[in-house]
Structure formats: structure tokens, C-alpha cells
Amino acid sequence: MDTLGEHWVFSPFRSFMTIEQITLILVHVCGLFFDLLVGFALFFDRSRPFGVFFCLSFHIMNSQLFNIGMFPYTMIATIPIFFHNNWPRKFLNRFAPKFLYKETPLQYSSSCLYSKE
């Protein structure tokens, strides 16, 4: 973890920070605050777009910095867990309404028994 400040991802910060400062402040301190705050950002509707942006940035950067296989991509795939349960329908309605199943009203049958509830 001591050599992360030397990675090319942090090259824009080298003009005004030393490698030790990059490692301490950007990697460790910002990583701590990211881990503490991103869950809350994803949980609330108003801050969710920011949380998604920061999660995507974080996991894409991890895929470039570390050789950890499919983990960053798996975490990117789990971000929609924090969305509302009808997000796929809204997404498809926006881009391809002809592919969605049209809901029809219920049709009662005389062959079935229904409860009085």
C-alpha cells in the first residue's frame, strides 16, 4: 500500500503533493471517508446519483490499480440493489416500450375457487 501514490492514476496530484501525502491523504483518509459515507449516499433517493457515480469511479479505479479479478465488476453489478424495485421497468419504458409485457386486467374464471378476502 505504500507504493500506491506512485501509480499513474494519481499523476495529476503529483504537481502539488508528495507521494507520501498522496498515499496518506488520498488513498487512506479519502478511502476511509468513502467507505463510511457511500452506503448512506446509496440509501437515500436524493443522494443516490452521487453515490452511484462515486461507487462506479471507485470500482473502476480499483480494477485499474489492483489485480483482483472480477471483484470490481461484481461490485458494479450489485449497485442496482440500492435502486427501487421497479427500476428495470422504468428503464425499459424509457428506451424500449415495445419489449415490455403489457399487463391486462384480471379475468375471473368460473372454474376457479376464490377466497372472500
Image: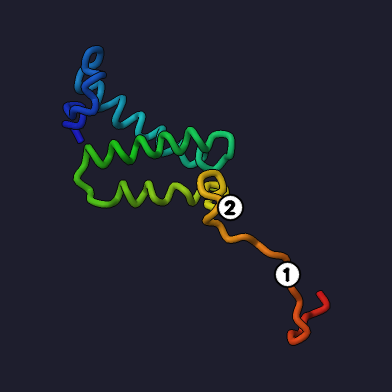
**Closer to us: 37 or 89:** 89
Q: Which of marks 2 and 1 is nearer the N terminus?
A: 2
In the rendered view, would you say 103 is above or below 74?
Answer: below
How crowded pointer 2 is (Cα within 10 Å; few <14, some 14-19, many 20+) is rated as: few
Q: Is mark 2 on a helix, strand or loop?
A: loop
Colour convention of the picture:
rainbow
Please tell me which residue is depicted at 31% across the width and 26% down the height of the picture. 26
In the rendered view, would you say 49 is above or below 102?
Answer: above
Please tell me which residue is depicted at 52% across the width and 52% down the height of the picture. 88
What amino acid is at disc 1? Leu
Q: Can you name the residue that lies furthest to the bottom here?
A: 111
Q: What element carries label 1?
A: loop
Q: How far apart are marks 2 and 1 (CA)?
A: 21 Å
Q: Looking at the rendering, in which quadrant would you find the C terminus?
A: bottom right
What amino acid is at disc 2? Asn
Exactly how many numbered labels are in the figure? 2
Please tell me which residue is depicted at 36% across the width and 29% down the height of the picture. 30
Residue 23: quarter of image: top left
Residue that badge 1 annotates? 106
Residue 55: quarter of image: top left
* Percent of width and height locating residue 87: 55, 49
Residue that badge 2 annotates? 86
In the rendered view, would you say 48 is above or below 15?
Answer: below
Please tell me which residue is depicted at 25% across the width and 23% down the height of the picture. 22
Q: Can you name the residue that lies furthest to the top here?
A: 16
| Mark carried by residue 79 | none
